[in-house]
């Protein structure tokens, strides 16, 4: 009962205090948004006052104009990156989950393959990307593989931990109920790994975009990574900035999607 | 012991019969040479200093750990056979609910385990819903464990333990983490459940007054190595009320046990 009463009391207090609930919520949004707007304004003023050339640092208004004017070009490069990121996300995480399951079920498999997984993870993604482009060619496959690779390791480690997170007492309960290995897996290990899995997926949601973009740097005709290289070498700073903002927008979108799914799935 | 020598109908067996049973963890002897018979339908409480093997004894009886020597026989069967037949249920110190399952589906868990493998699961007279009602959780069946208080969670665990209508209910300090008031309430409910179901109960506790209040017999263990100190008959009228704890007889038992405990 106490657990039910407590939040109600807090809410009541908020209503009684001089801060009504609405303005509290409003301030929560207004403070970060206001700060961001202020920073953009300072940037705009700074660039104008010190007369910084556009090709070195464009003003926000230049970037916005470019975003509007070059919207079709940005979108044409957006879709391949989105596709590579999501495909890489799915492939990399699926592989990590399956391998984690194998690790948990067989100590031998873990001993054999975990050091290799660590080794692959220690190779900088920038160093391995050219190798993968050589192997898979300049098409989308290489980018998908790079995005998958960057997602793989955090999910593997978290998933192994999650599958082992069942308490000893829960395993005793399973034994008293004479549960089979597969029942323990589906009814206990897998659900209890979900919070761990989702922390890894949230990391992967942002890193898969990085993987796809790094892959596109090495060699691609289309994609946000290719557009970044292209606009840099052509001194189109406003386009470069617009592309960077779009890339980060893509990461935020994927992160938010995973967070929303987490809220729906992990209710405990 | 007589029942073992002349095996007849199942009712002739003790609920749990230990013959010189010992449990070892490596070099450490957790339980040494335990011999006792717990008759069907009795309520025994186990008391003793920490490290005397109270929990180990429950784990031996429930086939969670094997006997290093001697034997443990449950209703005339091996502990493994009794476990496979779902005759034993265990209530742990913390509720050990699956946090992603609602109260109701936690109670249903034992009925799901083994269903797809074609295991015959003895379903009790009461449905999971009725069991939740019996432990006083009507209306909270769809709550997740984190939305329930500690006492409510433990009551869900008791309902889960009862769902296969066990013949032997093992409880390892189930109310240890609760405050005095909730503990009293749950003690009363447990006695009621015991009377209604007729199941044999082995109940480990740290509290002398809880041991006297619940038990028909108090099994006092002593440590290093874990062995039987004494089995004390508690001759108090039944059904027991909370008020009984103010009677001189109740207090006499308590001080007797306290003296025994100090000797351990």
Image: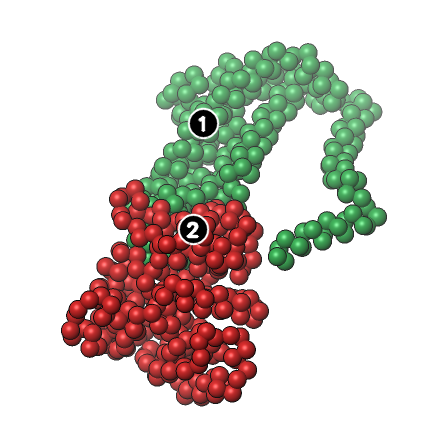
Q: Give the x, y percent position of residue A133.
A: 41, 22
Q: Nearer the viewer, residue A78 or B71?
A: B71
Q: Is residue B45 above or below residue A231?
A: below
Disc 2 to disc 1, C-alpha distance: 45 Å
Q: Is residue A169 above or below residue B224?
A: above
Q: Is residue A221 above or below residue A166?
A: above
Q: Is residue B212 above or below residue A234?
A: below
Q: Give the x, y percent position of residue A49.
A: 83, 25
Q: Chain of mark 1?
A: A
Q: What residue do we see at 56% from left, 36% from top?
A: A259
Q: Which residue is mark 1?
A: A88
Q: Which chain is painted in red?
A: B
| Neighbour tally class for label 1: few under 14, some 14-19, many 20 plus, Cα within 10 Å | many
Can see residue B247? Answer: yes
Q: Chain of mark 2?
A: B
Q: Nearer the viewer, residue B103 or A133?
A: B103
Q: Which chain is painted in green?
A: A
Q: What residue do we see at 31% from left, 44% from top?
A: B115
- Secondary element under disc 2, as helix, strand or loop, is helix
- Secondary element under disc 1, as helix, strand or loop, is helix
Q: Is residue A177 left or right of residue B181?
A: left
Q: Which residue is mark 2?
A: B128
* Res B67 → quadrant: bottom left
Asked if the residue under mark 1 is in contact with the one under mark 2, i.e. CB atoms within 8 Å, the reply is no
* Res B3 → quadrant: bottom left
Q: What residue do we see at 41% from left, 86% from top?
A: B260
């Amino acid at each position: 009962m106490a657990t039910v009463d407590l939040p109600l009391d807090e809410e009541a207090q908020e209503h009684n205090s001089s801060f009504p609930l609405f303005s509290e919520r409003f301030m929560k949004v207004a403070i970060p948004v206001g700060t961001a707007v202020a920073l953009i304004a300072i940037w705009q003023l700074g660039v104008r006052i010190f007369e910084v050339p556009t090709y070195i640092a464009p003003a926000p208004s230049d970037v916005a104009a470019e975003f509007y004017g070059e919207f079709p070009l940005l979108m044409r490069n957006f879709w391949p990156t989105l596709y590579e990121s999501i495909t890489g996300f799915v492939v990399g995480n699926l592989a990590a989950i399956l391998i984690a399951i194998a690790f948990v079920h067989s100590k031998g498999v873990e001993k054999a393959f975990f050091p290799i997984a660590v080794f692959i993870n220690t190779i900088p993604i920038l160093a391995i990307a050219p190798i993968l482009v050589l192997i898979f060619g300049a098409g989308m496959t290489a980018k998908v593989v790079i995005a998958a690779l960057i997602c793989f390791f955090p999910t593997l480690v978290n998933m192994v931990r999650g599958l082992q997170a069942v308490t000893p007492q829960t395993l005793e309960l399973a034994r008293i109920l004479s549960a089979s290995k597969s029942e323990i897996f589906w009814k206990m290990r897998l659900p209890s790994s979900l919070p761990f899995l989702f922390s890894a997926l949230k990391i992967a949601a942002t890193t898969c975009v990085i993987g796809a973009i790094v892959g596109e740097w090495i060699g691609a005709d289309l994609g946000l990574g290719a557009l970044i290289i292209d606009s840099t070498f052509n001194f189109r700073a406003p386009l470069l900035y617009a592309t960077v903002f779009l890339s980060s927008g893509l990461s935020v979108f994927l992160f938010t999607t995973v967070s929303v799914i987490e809220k729906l799935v992990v209710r405990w | 012991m007589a029942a073992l020598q002349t095996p007849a109908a199942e009712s002739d067996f003790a609920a749990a019969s230990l013959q010189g049973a010992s449990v070892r963890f490596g070099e450490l002897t957790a339980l040494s040479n335990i011999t006792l018979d717990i008759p069907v339908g009795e309520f025994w409480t186990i008391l003793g200093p920490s490290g005397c093997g109270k929990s180990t004894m429950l784990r031996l009886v429930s086939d969670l750990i094997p006997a290093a020597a001697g034997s443990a026989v449950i209703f005339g069967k091996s502990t493994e056979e009794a476990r496979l037949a779902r005759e034993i249920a265990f209530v742990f110190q913390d509720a050990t609910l699956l946090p992603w399952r609602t109260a109701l589906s936690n109670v249903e868990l034992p009925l799901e385990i083994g269903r797809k493998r074609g295991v015959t699961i003895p379903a009790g007279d009461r449905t999971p819903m009725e069991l939740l009602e019996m432990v006083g959780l009507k209306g909270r069946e769809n709550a997740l464990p984190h939305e329930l208080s500690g006492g409510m969670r433990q009551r869900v665990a008791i309902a889960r333990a009862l769902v296969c209508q066990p013949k032997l209910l093992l409880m390892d300090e189930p109310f240890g983490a609760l405050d005095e008031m909730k503990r009293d309430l749950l003690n009363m409910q447990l006695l009621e459940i015991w009377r209604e179901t007729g199941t044999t109960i082995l109940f480990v506790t740290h509290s002398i007054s809880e041991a006297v209040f619940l038990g028909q017999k108090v099994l006092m263990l002593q440590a290093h190595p874990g062995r039987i100190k004494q089995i004390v008959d508690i001759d108090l009228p039944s059904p027991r009320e909370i008020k009984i704890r103010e009677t001189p007889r109740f207090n006499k038992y308590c001080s007797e046990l306290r003296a025994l405990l100090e000797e351990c």
